[in-house]
Structure formats: structure tokens, C-alpha cells
Amino acid sequence: MERSVAELVGETDVEALTAEQVLEVVLETLHPNVALACSFQKEESVLLDMLLEREPEARVFALDTHVLFPETYAVWRAVEQRYGIRIAVYEGPSLGRQAAVHGDALWERNPDLCCSIRKIGPLGAALSSLDGWITGVRRDQAPSRASTPKLGWDERHELWKASPLADWTDDDVLAYVRERELPVNDLHARGYASIGCTHCTAPGTGRDGRWIGSGKTECGLHA
Ligand code: SF4
């Protein structure tokens, strides 16, 4: 059932708030039952910094598909060290177990099923104990994300969803990362605007480098 943001925040105009203010509203209304979904891209570098500065006990989780880039695992370790946190992990099946059930290289033969078992299933487990989640989704990343609200009811997962950087640009994100000298995924400097699994990610602007040539544009986490 669709729910109005006013139920959560009253008359506050969330769209007029800065990213930091959105996080403050989310923490005031939902902590400790809200968590940041961290994919270790530059947007999460920003959100981790803003969030943990305001609430050191804020919850953070990651989905480990077991086919992430070494650079992604490196920035994962770097942010845990910088902030003194352990990020909760929700995992897809190991490569061996997936191959035994579905055959090799499922991402080539059936990427939707691969995303379902490696991402969607683990996300459902992560969200099951929460009243809200925070994401790094930005409107200018793809047409499918153009109408992303800064805070809204996530009908599919039945909890609140905040995207505090919804109206930020690539340049806004990179400027914040530089100013705060944040750990950031090295792949961004090598032309990867969006970073997912090794088999399905190439350099490109926006989300152009994801699932090239397959017609697939989203893994199903956000759209
Ligand atoms: S992005 Fe590719 S490898 Fe990762 S879960 Fe989806 S299809 Fe599988």
C-alpha cells in the first residue's frame, strides 16, 4: 500500500532539503531501523562520510555477489578502516554453488536470474529487518532513475527509501570526495562511472557501461 512521506516527516518539504538534511531527517525518524546500502561507488563514499559523521552507530550493509572488482573490495576495506566499522554482508551463492545448480557463467546466459540470486535475494534479506534504506541513486544516472524522490515509500520492498543525492551530479559527488579526501573506488578514475560486477561492467558514462549489448539496464534493486 502506497504511503505518503507526510506520515513520516509531517509538513517538511524533503525535496527542498540538502543531502545532509535528508540524512538527518531519516536518522531522526528511522534510526536504528534504517541502513545505507553500500555498493562502494563514489556516491557511497559521500553518504558513508555524511552518515557516520552524524550517527557513528548508523547501520550499513553491502551485497557481496562474489564477482566484484578487486578495487571494490579494496575500498570496502579502506572505509571500514577509516570509520572503524564492520559493514554487514549479505551474500549471493558462491561461484561453485551457483555453477552446480545453474551451470557456468550464468551472467552470460541469464543475467536477470543471476541478478536475482546474487542481488535481489540478498537485498530482500537485508531489508527484512528494516523500516527504511538509504541509497546512492541519482536522477541523472539513467532515464529509469530520473524521477527518484529524495524520500519516498518503496512499494516493492515495503519500507521507506531515501536517496539523499538524488539531485547531485557526477561533479558534485567528485568535488565532495576530493574536498573530504575520502576513500573512493579507483575504477572511477579509469572511466567507470558506474561499477557493479566484473562480468557486467565496462568503462562508460552514466550507466552505459553496465550489461553492454544485452538490453538490460538495471539489476532490479532500484528499478
Ligand atoms: S551484475 Fe552480472 S554478475 Fe552481477 S549479479 Fe547481475 S548478472 Fe550476475
Image (cartoon, grey):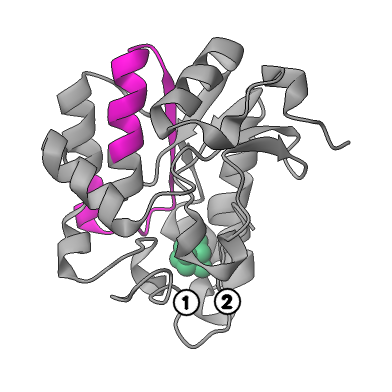
Vertical arrangement, residue 1 with respect to residue 191, above or below: above
Quadrant that contains the C terminus: bottom right
Residue toward you, 40 or 175: 175
Q: Locate residue 104 relative to residue 170 in the image: left or right.
A: right
Task: Give the residue at x 47% y 37%.
Answer: 164
Q: Secondary structure at mark 2?
A: loop
Pointer 1 residue: 211
Q: Earlier in the sequence, mark 2 or mark 1?
A: 1
Amino acid type, residue under disc 2 in the picture? Lys
Dot 1: element: loop
Q: Residue at x 21, y 18 (%)?
A: 84
Q: Are marks 2 and 1 in contact (CB under 8 Å)?
A: yes
Depth check, front residue: 29 or 83: 29
The x, y position of residue 216, in whole percent, is 57, 76
Q: Position of residue 154 (x, y in %)?
A: 71, 40
The kind of residue tagged 1 is: Trp
Residue 36 drawn in magenta:
no
Name the residue beneath numbered marker 2. 216
Q: Which residues are magenta?
A: 46-74
User: Vertical placement of 90 versus 28: above or below?
Assistant: below
User: Residues under labels 2 and 1: Cα distance?
Assistant: 6 Å
Label 2 crowd (10 A; few <14 / some 14-19 / many >=20): few
The foreground one among 68 and 7 is 7
Q: Quadrant of residue 115?
A: bottom right
**What residue is drawn where x is 35% and y is 15%?**
54
**Quick check: 64 left or right of 6?**
left
Within the magenta stretch, is there residue 49? yes
